[in-house]
Image: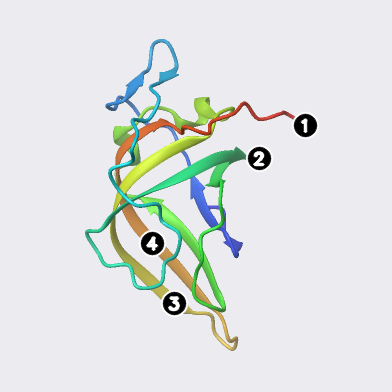
């Protein structure tokens, strides 16, 4: 997993078949508006079973990061782990577009880093849908 202080790091690995994707054409449908769930802007005060969305963009060396930073408690490093990633197609193929991932937040595992005033937080979530974000733009390759 990618682990970044100050950023929610979202990784993609291979998966197969999921709603909202046309795997054979490599096509993701555009999101419907208005959005039915709120954007995850902060980890502060979120409750398990809450639904959110996050817009993500591809960042080398092979992971998704939020298009907009997500606030987290002070002195925390955070990452989001998808519990059902295998049910979804290869997210790696969608690296040139901004994607919107709708999900259900399941819970967090927060551990203090020994001998430091820092914590490592892993947030678990279940993907419910993936679509092309309304503000999706092609990214430039370096």
Of callouts 3 and 4, the N-terminal one: 3
Measured as percent of width and height from the top left, residue 101 is found at 39, 41
Q: Which colour style is shown?
A: rainbow
Q: What residue is shown with label 1?
A: 142
Q: Is label 2 in contact with label 3 (beta carbons under 8 Å)? A: no
Q: Is residue 104 above or below residue 34?
A: below
Q: Is residue 67 above or below residue 98?
A: below
- CA separation, marks 3 and 4? 12 Å
User: As drawn, is 55 to the left or to the right of 7?
Assistant: left
Residue at image location 28% in from the left, 43% down from the top: 36
Measured as percent of width and height from the top left, residue 95 is found at 56, 30
Of callouts 4 and 1, the N-terminal one: 4
Q: What residue is shown with label 2?
A: 60
Of callouts 1 and 3, the N-terminal one: 3
User: As drawn, is 34 to the left or to the right of 13?
Assistant: left
Of callouts 2 and 4, the N-terminal one: 2
Mark 1 falls on what kind of element?
loop
């Amino acid at each position: 997993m990618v682990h970044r202080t100050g950023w929610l790091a979202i990784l993609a690995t291979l998966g197969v078949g999921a709603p909202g994707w046309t795997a054979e054409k490599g096509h993701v449908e555009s999101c419907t508006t208005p959005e039915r769930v709120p954007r995850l802007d902060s980890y502060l005060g979120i409750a398990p079973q809450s639904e959110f969305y996050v817009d993500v963009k591809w960042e080398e060396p092979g992971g998704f990061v939020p298009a907009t930073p997500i606030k987290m408690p002070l002195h925390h490093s955070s990452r989001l782990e998808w519990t059902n990633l295998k049910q979804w197609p290869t997210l790696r193929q969608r690296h040139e577009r901004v994607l919107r991932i709708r999900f259900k937040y399941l819970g967090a595992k927060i551990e203090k880093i020994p001998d430091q005033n820092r914590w490592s937080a892993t947030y678990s979530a279940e993907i419910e849908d993936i679509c092309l974000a309304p503000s999706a733009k092609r990214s430039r390759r370096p």
